[in-house]
Image: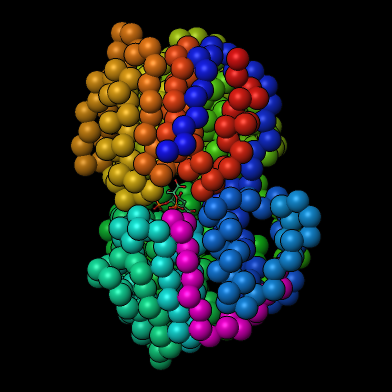
Amino acid sequence: MEQLHLPAVTQAQGTIILPGSKSISNRTLLLAALSDGVTIIRDLLASDDTARMLEALASLGIKLENIGENAWQVTGCAGNFPNKQADLFLGNAGTAFRPLTAALAFSQGDYHLHGIPRMHERPIGDLVDALRQAGADVNCTGNEGYPPLQISPATLDVSQPIQIRGDVSSQFLTALLMALPLTGQAASIEVVGELISKPYIEITLNLMQRFGMVVQRDGWQRFHIPAAACYQSPGEIFVEGDASSASYFIAAGILAGDVTVQGVGQHSIQGDIRFAEAAHLMGGRISYGESHVRAEKTSALKAIDLDCNHIPDAAMTLAVMAMFAQGTTTLRNIASWRVKETDRIAAMATELRKVGATVEEGPDYIQITPPVQLVRHAVIDTYDDHRMAMCFSLLSLAGIPITINDPKCVGKTFPEYFQVFAGIVR
Ligand SMILES: O=C(O)C1=C[C@@H](OP(=O)(O)O)[C@@H](O)[C@H](O)C1
Ligand SMILES: C=C(OP(=O)(O)O)C(=O)O
């Protein structure tokens, strides 16, 4: 297995330019593909997850032209994919798999959707149930409730409100919201139970609006899609820098110096921008501009006790920051960690124990007490999880060398991560 040896370091200083947001990139690609007109997308993320979406859209007959560095011209199909048969490999990209499932369920074709083995362990049953209420023909060809999926043409009826559970992944609601306009009919969605990861729904609604689709809503409970509406290309759209990717550099600044991330700022539409507030609770100074965030070390770090449901991805970074804090840090309401790239609660607990932490885990929380003295060197397993690899690089700032197993797993969202990290630490 490939390994990366990170040297012991103690300082982080400098400015980095963030890659594009994964969540915005994959939503924008799909909305541009479904819209009427040509869209130029700038600053698109170049990574495994966006490559899977680009390949899928190309297989569906969408014209996509790379017109410059991270710039794409997408010719939309006005809600009707040209290819009515396709076999789509979607890797482990939730932001491709879930939205494409819903869009293709309403596209009157024969489609097979599959991914890597872990994707076939990630639940999709709540979305499949919702699509079946609308008459869609979606078949789980392996285990019920999980990919792979076979989708067939069907007679759709969305005259009744569609109920969807939102307590396993918000991506199911995102998928339904983005796809329902394809039916051409007015439709309503009712969320059953507590919706998790709410800020991702704000990203969805914001981008749908930029493509001309205004969704009426009653809080987080009910959403109404207008009749006979087609997505309209906004012409040109810029993708913000990725706020989850920013978390590693904001953490580095707070732990060990002064780091500025460029590409995301105080008015970001991404919920993970609020990682900066959470990190600030542990210590350090945060300042914002229109398109940058600066993080500076000012004091020793304090432990925190925080509900992290609004920042599920960036919260992993807090778990590693806890190793630098005095006291016990508790991260709560993170049950969704268990159904992501790996069981992230179990993986985080195992790897933090390797460096000496005392860790308690529950179904939806993790509690971390750092050791008096960290181990002198650690070899970290990453479980094919980009965030495990990126998070644990931060431990090298404690002045211990860290070996990262399978470092290329960062390709899911940030292929250049380790080069960028090496550029700010010493
Ligand atoms: O909609 C999105 O872009 C995402 C939603 C979140 O998933 P859940 O809703 O499953 O928590 C997040 O973890 C994922 O990385 C991206
Ligand atoms: C959960 C994640 O990915 P996905 O979009 O595949 O759900 C993630 O990037 O942390």
Rendered location of residue 234, percent (x, y)? 72, 65
Q: Which quarter of the image is occupied by the C terminus? A: top right
Rendered location of residue 407, percent (x, y)? 49, 36
Between 315 and 88, the residue placed more toward the observer is 88
Q: What residue do we see at 58% from left, 42% from top?
A: 415
Left or right: residue 175 versus residue 273 is left
Q: Which residues are magenta?
A: 74-93
| Above or below 353: residue 236 | below
Q: Is residue 382 visible?
A: yes
Rendered location of residue 404, percent (x, y)? 44, 30
Q: What residue do we see at 30% from left, 65% from top?
A: 146
Prevalent SS, magenta region:
loop
Between 314 and 181, the residue placed more toward the observer is 314
Q: Is residue 159 visible?
A: no
Between 375 and 18, the residue placed more toward the observer is 375
Left or right: residue 164 versus residue 248 is left
Q: What residue do we see at 28% from left, 70% from top?
A: 142
Q: Would you say residue 155 sits in the magenta stretch?
A: no
